Amino acid sequence: CRTEKELPARREEVEHAMEEGIEFKFLTNPVKIEGEEGWVKSILCQQMELSEPDESGRARPVPIEGSEYEIDADCVIMSIGTSPNPLIKSTTKGLEVNKRGGIIVNEETGATSKEGVYAGGDAVTGAATVILAMGAGKTAAKAIDE
């Protein structure tokens, strides 16, 4: 993400997220998901800074050399765009994806080919609405609970 000012969200959404304990990492680029035996252990990140504005007038994030750091994690939820992350296939053994890179799931449960892993939203369908993503989350939650 760039800076708080440039978040593609309504101000009230950001405020509510912060009230719920969401911690934003501005000007941070996730570089690698570290794992052990197929399970997430941490995320390697690099701090960024905004460059001088380019010909379009937009400042772009550029890496700060030597600023890498690690965040302990046991779960990663990717919500950084409207298309599947191309790293999913190469970083998650046993996870089947389709030719567009979307995660293949059981439509009734959201279960993936990797035991205990569920998916929904843009990582499965590509660009779609938040409502569809929320529905997929509810479907998966129900299946997990059963």
Image: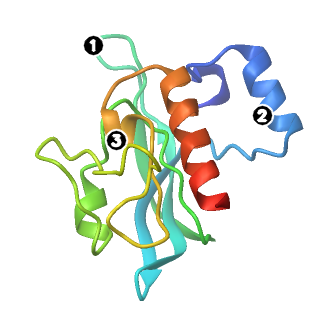
Q: Residue furthest right?
A: 19
Q: In the structure shown, which secondary structural element does the residue marked by tag 2 occupy?
A: helix
Residue 135 image offset from top left, x and y in percent: 55, 31
Q: CA distance from mark 2 to mark 1?
A: 34 Å
- Mark closest to the chain's N terminus, 2 or 3: 2
Q: Which residue is mark 3?
A: 124
Question: Hey, what amino acid is under mark 3?
Answer: Val
Near mark 3 (Cα within 10 A), the count class, few <14, some 14-19 or many ≥20, is: many
Near mark 2 (Cα within 10 A), the count class, few <14, some 14-19 or many ≥20, is: few
Q: Nearer the viewer, residue 13 or 115?
A: 115
Residue at 42% from the left image edge and 32% from the top image edge: 51
Q: Which residue is mark 1?
A: 55
Question: Hey, what amino acid is under mark 1?
Answer: Glu
Foreground tag (2 vs 1):
2
- Mark closest to the chain's N terminus, 3 or 1: 1
Q: CA distance from mark 2 to mark 3?
A: 24 Å
Residue at 62% from the left image edge and 18% from the top image edge: 9
Residue at 55% from the left image edge and 19% from the top image edge: 8
Q: Residue furthest left?
A: 99
Q: Which residue is mark 2?
A: 17
Q: CA distance from mark 3 to mark 1?
A: 35 Å
Residue 39 image offset from top left, x and y in percent: 48, 78
The image quadrant where one finds the C terminus is bottom right
Q: In the structure shown, which secondary structural element does the residue marked by tag 1 occupy?
A: loop
Q: In the structure shown, which secondary structural element does the residue marked by tag 3 occupy?
A: helix
Residue 30 image offset from top left, x and y in percent: 46, 56
Foreground tag (2 vs 3):
3
In this rendering, the count of numbered labels is 3
Q: Nearer the viewer, residue 46 or 100?
A: 100
Foreground tag (3 vs 1):
3
Q: Quadrant of residue 124?
A: top left
The reply to whether callout 2 and callout 1 are in contact (CB within 8 Å) is no
